[in-house]
Amino acid sequence: MQMPVNIDTARLRLRPFHADDMPSYLDYYTSDARTKGVGGAQPKDVAIERFLAMAGQWSIRGYGRYAITTDHAKPAFGHVGVLHLDSEPEMTWTLWDETETQKGFATEAASAVLEAWFAAGAKRIIAPISKNNEPSINVARKLGMEQDPNAVAPKSMPDGIVYAKELPA
Amino acid sequence: MILETERLFLRRPQPRDQDPSVAFFMSDRAVGVGGPYDLGQAWRHFAYELGHWEIFGHGMWAVTMKDDESLVGLIGPWTPPDWPEREIGWMIFENAEGKGIAYEAANAAIIDARTRLGWTTMVSYIKPDVTRSIALAERLGAKHDPNAKTPGDFPCLVYRHPSE
């Protein structure tokens, strides 16, 4: 399955990651401020691995996470898209930069990716979300995702609840 | 971009290298690179290998036998931005054992890093108890550099490769 590597929305440019995006990602992932909902801050070497693995997943799966920016000339301030390691594909959205929150960017970006995901032929996607992560739960609801009581959150997220969206049969 | 030695091809890793690579990361052989890992971590490590190429334009080479194209290791440049220096790393799969293949591949990777990538110096970070890796570094002409900084906070020895 292949998703487009670039997606434009009204305000956002979703594109492949560059080396220039890494400093902001590492700041985000190594600080407590914005990582509470995703298992907390990580050491720098783990954050680097995660960043490069996001870029690398595309070659393996033909889909993955996008860098979020408003302008192609600027580094990214978040990521959005499909994480798919060995288990079920997960929809993810994260704004690394606090100053870019509260603008509806996560919903706008994730909504465009979901549309492309189903257009590419996928039937279902889940989003495990920490039960205290209210902003993210709101995004999931706006995306039309519903709680799936049968799905189990990953062990890295013990307080997670799983939202899911399926293509109508 | 392909490097060729007497018995080997070295090329950019591809999705089809996934199964043997994941199997390596989950095996006891991965102890030198922080493993063994569970399936999810092993999968992410393989994605990390591909992403390294994607972002930096270089990375460890997938080393294959010329005769049957089997993957025998991942060997070559490794440059995460928090490491003090550029590394030549090696992950040698079981089917390459005892044939001098790792030496042949690492040597080609080092020459390419020097000539094409323009690296004037490079090291290999080796856990002190991984004696076979130390033997390989020495065979490649690398010398233990006790003054060099090490990455992260795990104990390792720094072997510096000759500059030419």
Image: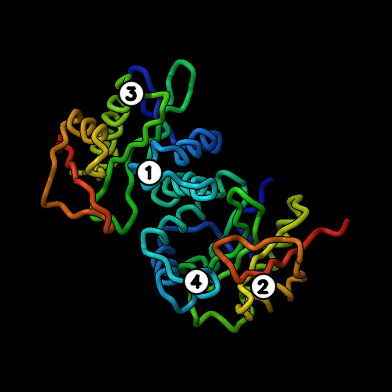
Distance between mark 4 and mark 1 Cα atoms: 25 Å
Q: Chain of mark 2?
A: A
Q: On residue B101, which mark appears?
A: 3
Tell me residue A132's x, y (percent): 61, 79
Which quadrant of the figure contains the C terminus of chain B? Answer: top left
The quadrant where residue B60 appears: top left
Q: Is residue B63 left or right of residue A127?
A: left
Query: Quick one: A167 or B128, which is closer to the camera?
Result: B128
Are both tags, 4 and 1, on one chain? no
Q: Is residue B48 above or below residue A78?
A: above
Tell me residue B7's x, y (percent): 36, 18
Q: Residue at x 43, y 45 (%)?
A: B53
Tell me residue B43's x, y (percent): 52, 46
Q: Which residue is mark 1?
A: B58
Q: Is residue B163 left or right of residue A63?
A: left
Are both tags, 4 and 3, on one chain? no
Please state which amino acid type lies under the numbered disc 3.
Ile
- Asked whether residue A37 is in view, the answer is yes
Q: Chain of mark 4?
A: A
Query: Quick one: B50 or A131, which is closer to the camera?
Result: A131
Q: Which residue is mark 4?
A: A77
Q: Chain of mark 3?
A: B
Q: On residue A108, which mark appears?
A: 2
Q: Secondary structure at mark 2?
A: helix
Is label 4 or label 3 in front? 3
Please state which amino acid type lies under the numbered disc 2.
Glu
Please state which amino acid type lies under the numbered disc 4.
Phe
Please state which amino acid type lies under the numbered disc 1.
His
Q: Chain of mark 1?
A: B
The quadrant where residue B113 appears: top left
